[in-house]
Amino acid sequence: MECKKTENKKECACKDKNCVRNGVCCECVAYHRKKGNLPVCLRGE
């Protein structure tokens, strides 16, 4: 599956636009899952 990083960044709710995982949803979700929390996009904020 091809990562659509540019398209993902348009809708990304993350406040840290300099994060290396910004727009790379699969890495972001895996990172937050490992930490025991949810990324902003899944918190419903």
Image (tube, grey):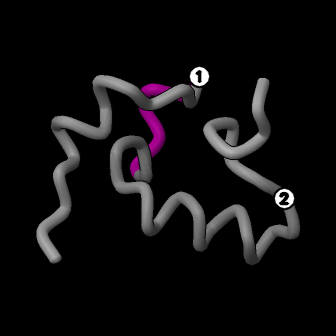
Quadrant in the rendering for residue 9: top left
Quadrant in the rendering for residue 24: bottom left
Left or right of residue 22: residue 44: right
- Name the residue beneath numbered marker 2: 37
**Helix, strand or loop at mark 2:** loop
What's the residue type where badge 2 is placed? Asn
Residue 19 drawn in magenta: yes
Query: Which quadrant, please, contains the C terminus?
Result: top right
Left or right of residue 37: residue 25: left
Q: Residue at x 38, y 26 (%)?
A: 11
- Name the residue beneath numbered marker 1: 15
Marks 2 and 1 sit apart, C-alpha to C-alpha, by 16 Å
Left or right of residue 26: residue 39: right
Where is residue 22? Give x, y as percent. 41, 42
Residue 41 drawn in magenta: no
The residue most toward the right is 36
The residue range painted magenta reads 15-20
What's the residue type where badge 1 is placed? Lys
| Residue neighbourhood size for the residue with mark 2, other residues' Cα within 10 Å, grouped as few (<14), some (14–19), many (≥20) | few
Where is residue 21? Give x, y as percent. 43, 52
Q: Residue at x 17, y 37 (%)?
A: 6
Tell me: residue 39, above or below residue 40.
below
Q: Residue at x 77, y 53 (%)?
A: 38
The residue most toward the left is 2
Where is residue 10? Give x, y as percent. 29, 24
Along the line of sight, which residue is nearer the eye, 27 or 8? 8
**Looking at the image, is mark 2 or mark 1 earlier in the sequence?**
1
